[in-house]
Image: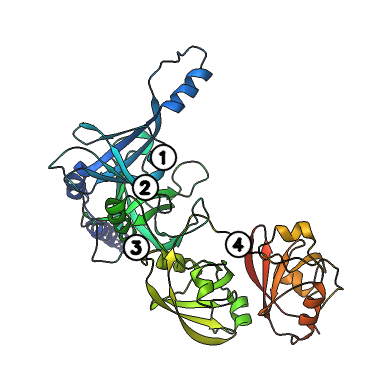
Amino acid sequence: MSVNVARLLVLVYSLCAITAHAAKALPDLTALIEGVSPAVVKVSVESPATAQGMAESHPWSSHDIPAIPLSLGSGFLISDDGYVLTNYHVVREASNIQVRLLDQREFQAQLIGADTRSDLALLKIEAASLPYLRFEQKQPLKVGEWVLAIGSPFGLDYSVSAGIVSATGRSLPSASGDNYVPFVQTDVAINPGNSGGPLFNLEGRVVGVNSQILTRSGGSMGLSFAVPAPVALNVVAQLKAKGRVDRGWLGLRVQGVDQGLANAFGLKKPRGALIVEVIAGSPAEEEGLLAGDIILSFDDQPVDRAGELAPLVGATEPGQRVRMVIMRQQERLTLTAVLGLLPDEQVLAGRPPVTDVGPPNRLGIRVRSLDTALALSVPGAAGVQVVALESQGPGARAGLLEGDIIVQLAYVYVEHAQHFDALLQTLAADKPVPVRVYRDGEYLYLPITPEQ
């Protein structure tokens, strides 16, 4: 046998050994799937309004056709007496909800309660001694951990897909713009119809409720998101007890801190939640929190990213007093606040407008005071509007746009154009300062370095 042939055989044997070892390292999911599948259900929703609309638009259908499915989704039993958890968007506006089990039994379900912010809904079917699933409450979910999902993608009942946890604590704004759920991101294949189904760990315990996908095609692209088990447990407990979910409320809007803002605010590294707006009449205003404060910890929990704050606040019981560590004008302070109850809508207070025009300034921009019509559209009704920018000026380089409303320069609220220019003259050159801007209905901060 030649040396080359011998080397080739050694290589082949090595590859076979590696392949065999890798195969042994992969989890065997067969027993797990067999054990948990009986507690997974298919959820079918009907709507008479949808059926009527279909009948009127279809030339050969009659007006007395039965209601047709509005949506299909998944869910799972969480108790032996018939409580079922699913997504709210699966059962929204439903006139009739049907739940089908693995053994083909079907039940009409009653909606006990729903929570739009977590997109969860609690159903109840009249049955006893049912198989049910348990939530993982001890082991924290880790990135890279194996997970699997069972559901009805595209109506294909009891389809199983598996993958790993890609990330935890993902902040995804809801339809209302808030983000009270720190989503679990996975690469498990999730498609329409999987919504509301369980996400399992290898112990067969529920670690999440499949809720969303990020897609351009309408199907799986390897980015799926689940409501984590601790959030689901809290929602279920409140829906069972009172049919609604109450959340703590501070009354803030925040943004993240990048390196430029960290430099402007005197932080050693980017971290925290930067307050861009304090709602009038909110607990935050009553306790003295200010726009420009950076929240570094909440109730002894570190806040490294802005998206981490809302879930911490929302999970805290209204009426509870919490401690916060903040950075204010480059000094650390400790404040306490009593949380309010998160309302559905907020109304912002206003201040009277002023209108006149200011000269060009050290930011390479030209501004004007707000006229009456524009002031009415800006919460607080004061500030200056950017009407022109030098293409290579400090303002343009920092990301200012024509039409932006500058409401705060450094740490001072801007009243009108002359006031803005006077404030600007007091700032040191070549040192970044935080500038608070109102743009397209939202506040944000930009770090801008004035010229000489």
Q: Position of residue 312 (x, y in %)?
A: 40, 68
Residue 110 vs 436, above or below: the answer is above
> Which of pointers 2 and 4 indicates the residue nearer the eye?
4
Q: Position of residue 348 (x, y in %)?
A: 60, 62
The residue where tag 4 is placed is 348
Closer-to-camera residue (289/96) = 289
Q: Are marks 2 and 1 in contact (CB under 8 Å)?
A: yes
Amino acid type at circle 3 is: Gly
Residue 13 vs 363, above or below: the answer is above
C-alpha span from label 4 to label 3: 44 Å
C-alpha span from label 1 to label 3: 34 Å
Return the disc, 4 or 3, that comes first in the chain's sequence: 3
C-alpha span from label 2 to label 1: 9 Å
Amino acid type at circle 1 is: Arg
Location of the C terminus by quadrant is bottom right
Where, by quadrant of the figure, is residue 83 drawn? top left
User: Residue visible at 48% across and 41% down?
Assistant: 218
Scheme of image coloration:
rainbow
User: Residue visible at 51% across and 41% down?
Assistant: 217
> Which of pointers 2 and 3 indicates the residue nearer the eye?
2
C-alpha span from label 4 to label 1: 30 Å
Q: Position of residue 267 (x, y in %)?
A: 56, 83
Return the disc, 1 or 3, that comes first in the chain's sequence: 1
